[in-house]
Image (cartoon, grey):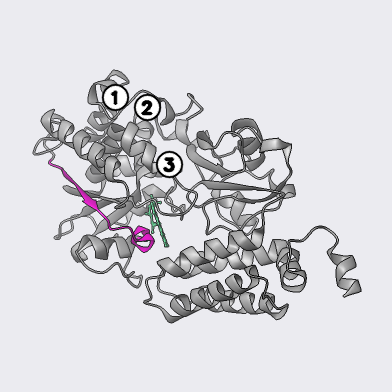
Amino acid sequence: MAETQGILMPLIQSECQILKNYRDRGGYEAAKKALSMTPDEVIQEVQASNLRGLGGAGFPTGRKWAFVPKNSPKPVYLVVNCDESEPGTFKDKYIITKATHALIEGIIIASYAIGAHTAYIYIRGEYVRQAEVLEQAIQEAYDNGILGKKVLGKDYALDVYVHRGAGAYICGEETALLESLEGKKGWPRMKPPFPAIEGLFRCPTIVNNVETLSYVPFIIKNGARWFAEMGTERSGGMRLYCVSGHVNKPGVYELPVTTTLREIIYEHAGGVPGNKKIKAVVPGGSSSPPLRPEELDVPAEFDALMKLGTMAGSGGIIVMDEDTCLLEILTVTTHFYHHESCGQCTPCREGTGWMDKILHRMLHGEGRIEDVDHLEEIANGIMGNTICPLGDAAAMPVLGYLKRFREEFESHALYKKCFDGEFAELKAAS
Ligand SMILES: Cc1cc2nc3c(=O)[nH]c(=O)nc-3n(C[C@H](O)[C@H](O)[C@H](O)COP(=O)(O)O)c2cc1C
C-alpha cells in the first residue's frame, strides 16, 4: 500500500474493518441519508455518478439497479461478487479486510435501492482469513443495530450472509456464481433472462463487485457530481488499480480513471526495475489483450482502452519488461483458462485445451510456423460462441498477443527463441 489519497485507500489504511474507526471517519452517515431518500432517488444518484461495474464488464451500476422490477411479488436479492479470481487482480481483498464497513454500508444502500432484504457475499474459497474478518465486521454491524430488523433504527430490514466458494474461477461469472450459491455446479446460465429479472432462486437479483459497492456510500454522501467529475464523460470517479509484474513498487493504487497507464506504471508504481524497457502491458487482468510500450499514454479507463481493442476489466495491470518471454506468458495464461473452463460449451472446453497443447509444444521447442495461424483460428472459433464470456477471456489474450506481438511467436516457431529484433534478417536468410 503506497498511497494515502483517494476514497477507499484512506479507509484501508485506517483499519475500517473496525466499526469505531469507520464511524470516526463519518461511517454509516451515507446509509442514514439514503434511507431518508426514496429508492428511486438513490438509484438516480448512482446513475448520475457514472459509477461503472468494477468487476470487469464496466456496466453502469445505477442503470443495472433500475432493471429490477418495481413491486416484485418475489423477493429481490443483492449478491456481492467477491470471487476475485482474474489473474492480476487483488483489490477486493484489501476492501474486505480493511475497509469492510464501507462495503457493508454500500450493501445497505444498494439493497435498499433495489428493494432487497437479503444480501449474500460470495467470497472465493481461498480467502479464508478475509472471510473471517468479513464475518466479524458483519456481526459487529448486527450488534450495533446497523443490520437486522431495523437497519440504523429505520423501518427497513436487511440480513447479510457470507457464502464461501470452493476455488473455481468460473464462479466469478455472475450466473455461475448464482448457480453455486444455490448449491449447484457452477455452470453459467444463458442470458437473457438477466439476473436483474431472474437471478438467485429465479428471483430478481443484482450482482455487483465488492469495489463497485464500496464506492456507493461516498456517492450518496458527496453527491453524484463530485464522483462523476473525477472521471470521464461516461466513467465516474476513481478505481483501485492492482499493479504487478516488473515494477519497483507493485501494489494497489487508487487513482482517477483518467490516469494513463504510463503514469500508473512510472509515477505511482516506481517504473521498471533496472530501468529496463517495457515489452508489454496487460491493462485489465489476464484476459485483456496486452498493449505495446508506445501505447501506454491511454487513460486506464473502460472506453479509452476499448478503443485500443483491449479492456480496463478488473483493473489488474501486469507489466512485462523487455526480457519477458511472451510465449511463456501466453502459455501460462492459456493453461489457466483451460484448467478453469467449466466444460459446458464445446468451443471453450475443447478450444482452450487445443491452444494449451499447441502453446506448450511451442514452448518446448517443437513449434511449427503454421501453429501461429492455427492458434488464431481456434481462438476465433471460441470468441462469441459460448454461453458465458470465459471463452472470450481465453481467446482474447491469444488473439491480442498474436495481433501485437506476432513476431515473438513466429520467432519461437521458426528459431526456437524469443524475437531479438533481427527477425527480418533471419527470415530472409532462412
Ligand atoms: C469468467 C468470468 C469471471 C469473472 N470473475 C469475476 C470476479 O472474480 N469478480 C467480479 O466482481 N466479477 C467477475 N466477473 C464479472 C461478473 O460476471 C459480473 O459482471 C460482475 O460481478 C458484476 O458486478 P459489477 O457490475 O459491479 O462489475 C467475471 C466474469 C467472467 C466472465
Range shown magenta: 157-173
* Mark closest to the chain's N terminus, 3 or 2: 2
* Crowding near the residue tagged with mark 3, few <14, some 14–19, many ≥20 C-alpha atoms within 10 Å: many
Q: What label sits on residue 102 in the rendered view?
A: none
Residue 270 vs 63, above or below: the answer is: above
Task: Say whether marks 2 and 1 touch (CB < 8 Å).
Answer: yes
Local SS, label 1: helix
The amino acid marked with disc number 1 is Tyr
| CA–CA distance in space, label 1 to label 3 | 19 Å
The amino acid marked with disc number 3 is Lys
| CA–CA distance in space, label 2 to label 1 | 7 Å
Residue 398 vs 45, above or below: the answer is: below
Identify the image quadrant of residue 387: bottom left
* Crowding near the residue tagged with mark 2, few <14, some 14–19, many ≥20 C-alpha atoms within 10 Å: many
Residue 44 image point, x, y percent: 36, 43
Q: Residue at x 32, y 38 (%)?
A: 96
Residue 253 image point, x, y percent: 51, 34
| 172 or 119, nearer to the observer | 172
The amino acid marked with disc number 2 is Leu
* Crowding near the residue tagged with mark 1, few <14, some 14–19, many ≥20 C-alpha atoms within 10 Å: many
Which dot, 3 or 2, sits closer to the camera?
3
Instruction: From the image, tell me which residue sits under label 3.
Output: 91
Task: Say whether marks 3 and 2 touch (CB < 8 Å).
Answer: no
Instruction: From the image, tell me which residue sits under label 2.
Output: 11
Query: Does the residue tagged 1 have its C-beta within 8 Å of any atom of ligand 1?
Result: no
Residue 82 at least partly seen: yes
Horizontal relation, residue 401 to residue 228: left or right: right
Identify the image quadrant of residue 275: top right
* Mark closest to the chain's N terminus, 2 or 1: 2
Instruction: From the image, tell me which residue sits under label 1.
Output: 22
Instruction: Tell me which image quadrant ligand 1 sits in.
Output: bottom left
